[in-house]
Image: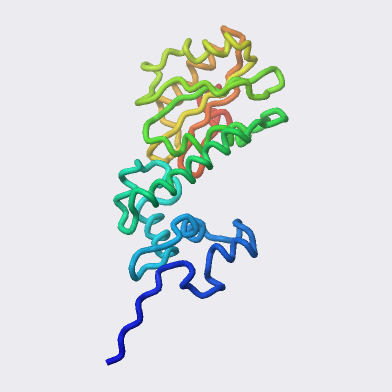
Amino acid sequence: MVEETKASYRIKDMAEDERPRERLAEFGPEALSKAELLAILLRVGRKGVSAVQLANEILTDLGGLGGIQRATFSQVCEVKGLGPAKAAQLKAAIELGRRLILETPELTGAISSPGDAAELVRYEMQGLVQEHLWVILLDTRNRKIKVDKLYSGSLNSSMVRVGELFRTAIQLNAASVILAHNHPSGDPAPSPEDVALTRAAVQAGKLMDIEVLDHLVIGRGGFVSMKEKGLGFA
């Protein structure tokens, strides 16, 4: 009886032209799929399952890279084929990406579009499991002074003290602000409460001579500019 060969499940056991690490070295990281990039971090899969296949399972089970970001360490550990070491590698890589975004969005020019403003906060906000409200403070040239992280939890116009939105802006002599909050559901469509809060903030800003330039609603993979939609700014 011919003995069955052991199933290959390590990257080095794969055909050379399928090895993510070698493909990265030859073609660059941008040529690899998300699963291949994760496979490089994992290094090995589990018995009968390659690292790339395991990476695809992780992306499916947790809901993509955003799902890995939102998942707790324990939830990542629960994926079949992962343990504390591999889960830590994945969470560390996601966190490094988050910190890179925080270090590099120092836009030397002015924020000239909703997209510019969204890039300052989108990576971090779309991974939050609770609703958060942040205020981007800008100088007279529309350059970022600070991102003030104010509220977390269920947000509506009755719970948020509008004056709090401008406290740091007054202290730092900001000329204008952009509000940003996330929808943990992933759908960035503004709610009636979002519109009411925006309208109240715009009116308060006029009294304080601090213009509210926009209110961004961040979802998974996208955002909505309430200013562009004319919601709360009429």
User: Outermost residue toward the bottom?
Assistant: 1
User: Outermost residue toward the top?
Assistant: 207
Q: How many marks?
A: 0
17 to 133, vertically: above or below:
below
The residue lying at 52 percent from left, 30 percent from top is 216
Location of the N terminus (image quadrant) = bottom left
The residue lying at 61 percent from left, 56 percent from top is 30
The residue lying at 59 percent from left, 65 percent from top is 23
The residue lying at 42 percent from left, 27 percent from top is 132
Left or right of residue 19, residue 9 in this image: left
Q: Position of residue 90 (x, y in %)?
A: 44, 48
195 to 54, vertically: above or below:
above
Q: Along the line of sight, which residue is nearer the eye, 232 or 68?
A: 68
Q: Position of residue 124 (x, y in %)?
A: 49, 36
Left or right of residue 100, residue 64 in this image: left
Q: Along the line of sight, which residue is nearer the eye, 44 or 210?
A: 44
Q: Position of residue 230 (x, y in %)?
A: 55, 28
Left or right of residue 5, residue 28 in this image: right
Q: Is residue 67 visible?
A: no
Residue 213, by quadrant, is top right
117 to 137, vertically: above or below:
below
